[in-house]
Amino acid sequence: MTEKDLIKKAGDALDAKLEEAKKTGNLVVKDATEDEAVIRSTFEKGEGVFRLFPAFVPRRFGKAGHRLKLHPDDYFAFGMARGSITERWFASTIAAQNGETAKADEGMAYVCVDYDSDEKFSLRNAVKVLGEELVGKELMDKYNGWPMYSKFFDNENPLFHHLHLGFEDAARVGKLGKPENYYFPKQLNNYFGEANYTYFGFDPDVDPEEIKDRIRHFADDDTRITELSRAYRVELGTGWYTPAGVIHAPASVLTYEPQWNSDVNSVYENIVSGEVYPPEMLDEELPEDKKDIEDVFKLLDWDKNVDPHYRKHYFRRPIVETETEQYVQKWITYANPYIAAKELTVYPGQTVTIKDGAAYGCIFVQGHGKFGVYDAEAPTLLHFGQQSSDEFFVSEQASEKGITITNTSKVEPLVVLKHFGSNCPGVPQEVPEN
């Protein structure tokens, strides 16, 4: 089954789940319209740009880092049993895999029709209605839609050592592989939480049998798997590329994560900061007849995990794309075949028109001004369910024409992070010497 076939199959399953959820009301956004006329008129009024509704996501594990600009009263908006809100998703046409008690549309992006109304429609439906007009011919032909999303990951404690399945392994359970990228924005990290370091892979001298022996006792005792790994301290304003199949334990630093349209993993660490994780998290993404330790171990891309030059190959320091007296735009995600991302800074009082050449989602992290026809501002505090003016989705045609951006502050930069699919032109393919 091709990647496009898997995307279509997963999309059909999600659509069926969403239809069923409409009957029970098991949705975050219960009254979304599917009216094509509304979708098209909103697209036209926005001149090819949509303003998105904040998509906050709870997780059953971890502790909220409280850096999402979410109101302190709202971190358990989904109920205590669902855990705290630790993520905000951007430009997502898929739903989070959050268990049987989850809302069917958790994590999905919705478009706000107007400030004076609560009317919304899903970005997923907008892609179906507008197709090439929105995401371009290349992505529609190759992926039948928008193939990535991004998020803010925000935990006070470090996350468990885990991997995201490669495409071949994920296909066995009808899912997609998940390469992902990290960038640590300075604007959202006034503190680092419990651990300002991320583990990647394993020490090059580790014997595979040591790994197998640790995870063999997942249900019985602490695996202490990170004793066999390597940790790197987080440097704000930089990032990493994490290929599928590479094990990692993210730092407790708010992280901007452009990634592939998938939410699939295998967890090798069973105790983190005193929190215990159940055995099924080790093998829940394996076929029923392929759940022994050897099968779990084979999910690892071993050569990448023990690469003696891991930092050289996967650390990402920003690369300046364009710099003028008015603005600077940098590549922050690059040198991988799936995803790109940029950080744009417009200086105080300046107006610029930026052409990126491909559809993208974006999130403002500092300042206020104009973004095309919209007001744009990085929020100070948002209530759950409140509209915002910090997140947008830009069509390919609007991106090619160029978005005019004005920084209306006299003193503060206007900063926006942009996430692209695999067709963004001009992405650097080489990693500079770190």
Image: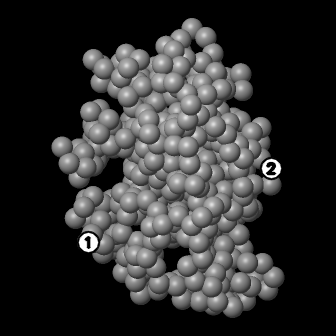
Q: Is residue 107 above or below residue 297?
A: below
Residue 108, x across and y down, in percent: 45, 51
Quadrant of the rendered structure where residue 269 is?
Answer: top right
Residue 394: horizontal and vertical position, in percent?
45, 73
Disc 2 residue crowd, few under 14, some 14–19, many 20+, Cα 10 Å: some
Q: Nearer the viewer, residue 90 or 167?
A: 167
Residue type highlighted by circle 1:
Lys
Q: Residue at x 27, y 17 (%)?
A: 289
Is 335 placed above or below 169 here?
below
Q: Residue at x 63, y 61 (%)?
A: 434
Residue 253 vertical position relative to residue 149 in the rendered view, above or below = above
Please name whichever residue, 256 or 337, is drawn nearer the observer in this view of the structure: 337
| Residue named by callout 2 | 191
Q: Earlier in the sequence, mark 2 or mark 1?
A: 1
For this rendering, which residue is in front, 144 or 210? 210
Label 2–label 1 contact, CB within 8 A: no
Q: Is residue 418 above or below residue 311?
A: below
Q: Which mark is residue 137?
A: 1
Residue 329 numbered mark, or none: none
Q: Is residue 160 visible?
A: no
Secondary structure at numbered mark 1: helix
Residue at 43%, 59% (x, y): give it.
Answer: 336
| Crowd rating for badge 1 (residues with CA inside 10 Å; few <14, some 14–19, many 20+) | some
Q: Amino acid at mark 2?
A: Tyr
Label 2: element kind: loop
x, y percent for residue 240: 57, 54
Q: Quadrant of the N terminus?
A: top left
Task: Return the residue found at the far left.
Answer: 1
Q: Residue at x 77, y 42 (%)?
A: 193
Query: Distance between the Cα atoms at labels 2 and 1?
Result: 42 Å
Residue that lies at the very extreme toward the top in this rendered image: 220
